[in-house]
Image (cartoon, rainbow, N blue to C red):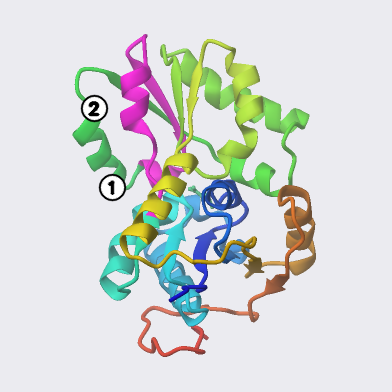
Amino acid sequence: MDDGRPIGVFDSGIGGLSVLQRIREHLPYENLVYVADARYLPYGDKPPELIETRALCICQFLTAQKAKAVVVACNTATAAAIARMRERFSLPIIGMEPGIKPALAMTRSGVVGVLATRETLSSRKFESLVTRFGGDKKLVVQACPGLVEVVEQLALNSAGTRALVARYVGLLLDQGADTLVLGCTHYPWLSDLIQEIAGPGIVIIDTGEAVAREVSRRLKAADVLTLQTSSGMEQFYTTGELAGFEQVVARLWSRSAPVMALPAGFGDGHTDIIDFSPNRNCR
Ligand code: DGL
């Protein structure tokens, strides 16, 4: 039996599109539904309880779209919400994790730098990752306020963005880092700039590719891959302003696809989610 149900993917904004691209490369025939929770962007400076509520609402929306799996294409939301999401929903839920393990295997200086949001770096999940892989090598971390916002504005090479990247990357290089982990899915959109500023000897680690492989592996294991051999479709939703999101999708996504707004106030004011029946959103 063919399983044409979509894979649901979400992020606070356009960061998750960097992961969606990798998923599309690995799974060309699958249908994809993407949600950008732009009204609540940036997640990185929000309390974890709010991010958790948003993640549960969006997951509920995606299951109402008949998603067969959900990808939390956001390090911040993974850290804040994936445990609760897995408790509440029985479908496969795949999250992001900063690539500390591969970075520690690659460093020659013995110092790995992590760029991420404040919320990711202060999360218990990140702390346990460090404890698990830390060992005798050194990890230095840098929160990057403002970086998500410039990516959202598609200011990928402006003077202001260059100055922010130079500051954050410089602080890690000054501490001896020779390997930089991109711990936020917005940052791969800046990876050329980060490489240019850091210099050719610095290795940059992004886990989008590994997550796409994991999505593929999980769908295969659950025997829910589509049998179609024609290109899958994409649908994009935002909780933010539609016109701006349409422009971003047109610029960053190589194919045309419908872009829609979620109802105004989607999920607002929710502290608990009770009704999981299809066709209900969190309003
Ligand atoms: N792209 C996200 C992440 O990977 C969220 C960034 C934000 O909204 O602060 O952490």
Q: Which mark is residue 125?
A: 1
From this view, report whether residue 134 is shown above or below residue 253.
above
Query: Is residue 101 part of the magenta span, yes or no?
Result: yes
Q: Is residue 144 above or below residue 193?
A: below
Residue 8: x %, y % from top left: 50, 66
Residue 216 placement, left or right of 197: left
What amino acid is found at the position of numbered circle 2 in the picture? Answer: Gly
- Mark 1: which amino acid? Lys
Q: Secondary structure at mark 2?
A: loop
Q: Residue at x 62, y 53 (%)?
A: 14
Residue 235 percent across, percent down from the top left: 65, 68
Q: Please indicate, yes or no, whether residue 146 appears anywhere in the rendered image.
A: no
Secondary element under disc 1, as helix, strand or loop, is: helix
Left or right of residue 282: residue 276? left
Residue 112 within the magenta-colored segment of the rendering = yes
> In the image, which residues are magenta?
95-121
Q: Nearer the viewer, residue 94 or 15?
A: 94
Image-quadrant location for residue 94: bottom left
Mark 2 to mark 1: distance in Å? 14 Å
> How many neighbours does mark 1 have within 10 angstroms: few (below 14), some (14-19), or many (20 or more)?
some
- Contact between marks 2 and 1 (CB within 8 A): the answer is no
Looking at the rendering, which quadrant does residue 190 occupy? top right
Measured as percent of width and height from the top left, residue 145 is found at 55, 40
Seen in the picture, residue 14 relative to 68 is either above or below; the reply is above
Mark 2 vs 1, N-terminal side: 1
Q: Which residue is found at the position 65% from the left and 47% from the top? A: 149
| Label of residue 134 in the image | 2
User: 114 and 174: which one is in front?
Assistant: 114
| Quadrant housing the N terminus | bottom left
